[in-house]
Image (cartoon, rainbow, N blue to C red):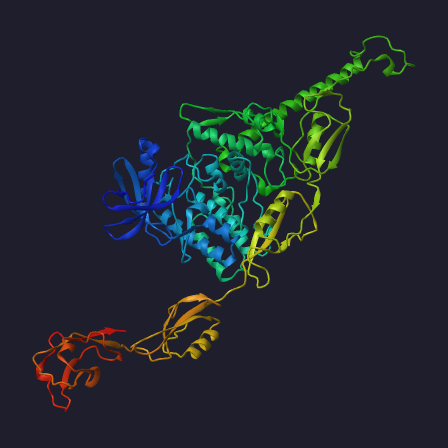
Amino acid sequence: MLKPGMILDERYEIVDVVGSGGMSIVYKAKDHRLKRFVAIKVLKPEFSNDMNFVSKFRVEAQASAGLAHPNIVNVYDVCEDDGLYFIVMELVEGITLKDYIAQVGRLSMDMAIDFSIQIASGLEAAHEHHIIHRDIKPQNIIVSKNGNIKVTDFGIAKAATSNTMSTTGMGSVHYISPEQARGGYSDERSDIYSLGITMYEMVTGRVPFEGDNNVSVALMHIQNDIIPPRQYYPDIYSSLEKIILKATQKKPERRYLTANALIADLKRVQANPNIDIVVAPLGVTNSPTQKWSKEEMNAIKTGSAARDASSLNTFPVNNQGNMTGVSSVQPGTNSRLNQLLQEDDYDFDDEDEYSDNQSSQNGKRGGIKKVDDYEDEDDTDYDSSDDDGDGVDPKLEKVVMVAGVAAAVIIAVIVMVIIGNIMGWFRFGDRDDTTDDTSSVSEETTEIEMIDVVGVSRDAAASLLDDAGFTNYKFESQHNEDYEEGYVYDQSVKKGEMIAPDAEIIIYVSAGAEDIQIENVVGMENNEATKILEDQGFKVTHSFEASDTVEKDKIISMTPSGGSMAPSGSTVNIVVSNGPDIQEVSVPNLLNKSEADARSTLESFNLEIGNVTHENSDTYASGYVMRQSISAGTTVNEGTSVDIVISDGPRTVTYTASLSGVITNNGYPFVEGETITIQISANIGGTSYPMFTSSASSEDAFPMDVSGASRLDGLTSGSGTLSVRVTAGDGTDISSYFSSNGLSLSFTQN
């Protein structure tokens, strides 16, 4: 991992780690050449020596660098520095859509539509350049601080050509399209499917399929129907639900064919939520035939076998919507899924094409009869490419031929039995007409092998048992948390046991999970409430609302309500308080207002006055606001405090003057009994200030030290001059006899 301060390519200074992926680490860096911050995606060291990975890394940059769109993260450069391979990209300040949903819960309809339009717009720009993302998911979508959406990480994108192609590139399993899950051909419509799953998560706060492992989730994308979003939240627009269901159709030709068509419908719903949207169009018959490799065909074979097995209702579904039959399959077990997978047999010729050799006669597949709970023409997968040139299905032709032969054999057997009875061919000894046939003919008791019906629906189990020849079975319903209501979870006679056809068999059918009383968590803190409900066995979803009465992060309400009964494993939605619905206001300008006016103005904006202090100012008059802690025009929450500083007017500078020095007698003849007077004055700012006055009667008083003898405080000027006057007893000026050299006046600013 790179350290902050390191320089790449003599240009990019590493600042901090932003995130990490499977192949690379993303750093925030400073571009010293262009004076801007960028994001740098650096290939991890363990992949740097693998030229295959390096090649993929460069392809990502080349594919993305050609895209310039407001909803796509821009790629600036691709570089290599001392064995480090990295891409320089636009740095987007924000969080991923996945984290955003985790923070706020499911999005409002308007926000979900807006985000979806922006994502689809980015995809439309990529598709126009023949670039398919192949890994659309909330983790690869950034919500910037200004609300704009950016699609990032074209990590497995490839430039699509006009030629058909196949790929094994698969995105995240919770958002993967059915054709990607099979390892088959994927195009722009695969991105639309993944976007549809992302839209589903935006409006419901959850993904449609959850499983114990990636295989079970991928198979659900291939086989299972998506639960319509409005079954979770009826407030979702019906028109938006139809768009999501159309985008997530199993067959690519039933989805939106282009991102532009999806955007058009989203904008229609944005303008009028009550508009009607067609869910799925008729199948497109001119979808190009693809040529696949053996490896790709094996992936399709596995998905096809699992899809056919699902028609037998052999996959139990638990209360979380997980297919326990799929997730629990282990290699080597004799499960119905493994039987189907093993019996699906494809032969490849030298050109890597294949022919399907598995039996389809009489409604059977791989030797197991196909049993459906109901028939629905809309669910019938039909591909016109299976027909031969004259419009007749060759499989149907084979079935008709076999049926004809079977009918001929049955008619021949019936004719032989009739003739045999007439001719007495079937009499094997003398009979006593008065004796009952049952007394002379020993009935041979036959036993048949018990079949496995665990995991199938009740109706399907009855059909399977009837077909196997069992006549004495009954159903018992009991609560079971692991199997969906109406599905068999156990049987009194285990699979493989040999029993008489009329032996009693009890089939145990799940009545769903047993209802338990939901703990009332209203008023509790969110984390505590969530843990209590999850410990009870419930799935917990969150909604968020503002509340003036319920403290932030505490529960406002719950559905179903606390104290009511609900099956274990069902979903409980709790509404979490976001605190008061605080409005934002713009801070007013308080400068040159009196303190009273400033208080009044802040109150009118639902703001509060904070600390009030005073300072001198040469600009603002005394008593008026000269500064505020939050600048005018700044957006803040109501109730925010604003500090103000009141002017005390210009600052008055004062000085202190001090006298220092010595007065020297230069020859004045003192007369006995005579007293002279020494006076020192300071002329400061045009005013004379007495500084020193003293008297002397003899020469012994000199030299006379006058330092510190006097000081003047509160002066407005910091300069001045001194004058010395010495007078005899009769008032005569005798200053000329005395020297004041070295006498000085010093000033100190207060």
Quadrant containing the C terminus is bottom left
Farthest residue to the right: give it.
434
Farthest residue to the top: give it.
429
Counting from the top left corner in percent of width and height, residue 642 is at 43, 69
Judge whether 707 appears above or below 13 on screen. Answer: below
Counting from the top left corner in percent of width and height, residue 60 is at 34, 41
Q: Is residue 46 left or right of residue 440?
A: left
Judge whether 460 appears above or below 561 on screen. Answer: above
Q: Is residue 748 left or right of residue 393?
A: left
Residue at (21, 84) in percent of width and height: 690
In terms of depth relative to the viewer, which is nearer, 517 or 51? 517
Q: Is residue 537 left or right of residue 71?
A: right
Which quarter of the picture shows residue 377? top right
Quadrant containing the N terminus is top left
Q: Is residue 205 left or right of residue 118?
A: right
Residue at (42, 66) in percent of width and height: 635
